[in-house]
Image (cartoon, grey):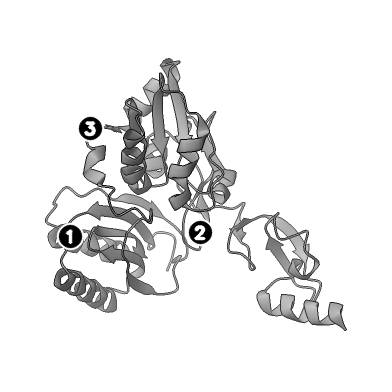
Amino acid sequence: MSAQEVSVAAFYKFASFGSDEVQSLKARLEEFSQTSGLRGLVVLGAEGLNATVAGSPAAIRGVKELVRELVADPSLEFKDSTCEKIPFARFKVDVRQEIITTKDATIDPAESAGTHLTPQQWHEMIASDPDVVLVDTRNDYEVEVGTFEGALDPKIKKFSDFQKWVEDSGLPRDKKLFMFCTGGIRCEKAVPEVKRLGYESVYQLQGGILRYLEEYPEGFFKGECFVFDHRVAVDKNLEPSKLYKLCPHCGNPAQEKISCCNCGKAAVVCKHCIPQADKNTCSKNCAYHARRKQAA
């Protein structure tokens, strides 16, 4: 596909699906993929769905129409971007207990109602309100790639650790807490978590970083935004990253250039793997052979 032909759409919807509905939704989406060439990942469960998909403009238009019909929400929001190569190897519907993992089944995203700020409201308030405290709810490797200027970094390895971080963080209770994530879905659970801990002035960025960059590419977000596909990240114009590749060993964003110590091929690994001799390699296979040579 050419750059004009590959469209990407990210979306989520909290809903209440029975087990039969989940299987029916899965079948409808898989059938559409087979006929349209759509690729991507859809996380589906009793609480809704969360997805990033890619394909031709026609395929993306079609899946938007289908999903809005399936979830009975004609105004469902999609975050759109484009790329030169389709960033998924296949299409998969992954049925899980939660569409965003917290390990706390009592959290109700409906509790976040009334906390959403549009990108314009967010931009204007962080520019003018000294009582705003920005909180990044994403994992540490995502924050390293880019974040809002002055935002707090919880340095968590997984989202289910976020609540514990809040409990231990000493976040000011007399300030407005502005929370954000990639596309908005993590904040739908992060906000109720924080409000349950007694914080009252808690808000979230509607549509996440992706929607903000659509409207404010030269705004307060610095760096790039990590995405969970082969683009690795998108820049301020929502174009695929030219700075990062996926580390062949851990899958995190990587930009440390090396010459593979096993085969000599040029490669890129992340800064966390590069200190390990066997991971100065272009692949897990070469890492295996490097370890064997070191042990010989």
Quarter occupied by residue 266: bottom right
User: Earlier along the polypeptide chain: callout 3 or callout 2?
Assistant: 3
Task: Point out residue 270 in the picture as x, y percentages from the top left corner.
Answer: 67, 57
Q: Which is more foreground, mark 3 or mark 1?
A: 3
- The residue drawn where x is 77% and y is 70% is 278
Vertical side of 193 occupied by 43: above or below: below
- Residue wearing tag 2: 231
**Distance from Cα at disc 2 to Cα at disc 1:** 25 Å
Vertical side of 201 occupied by 266: above or below: below
- The residue drawn where x is 21% and y is 43% is 110
Please state the total of marks drawn on the protein image.
3
Circle 3 crowding by C-alpha within 10 Å: few under 14, some 14–19, many from 20:
few
Q: Amino acid at mark 1?
A: Glu
User: Earlier along the polypeptide chain: callout 3 or callout 1?
Assistant: 1
Q: What quarter of the picture does the N terminus occupy? A: bottom left
Task: Point out residue 239 in the picture as x, y percentages from the top left corner.
Answer: 48, 50
Q: Nearer the viewer, residue 242 or 290?
A: 290
Q: Is residue 237 visible?
A: no
- Residue wearing tag 3: 114
Vertical side of 24 occupied by 45: above or below: above
User: Is 62 situated left or right of 204 in this image?
Assistant: left
Q: Residue furthest right?
A: 296
* Residue 65 marker: 1
Q: Amino acid at mark 3?
A: Gly
User: Earlier along the polypeptide chain: callout 2 or callout 1?
Assistant: 1
Determine whether label 3 and label 1 are within 8 Å by CB: no
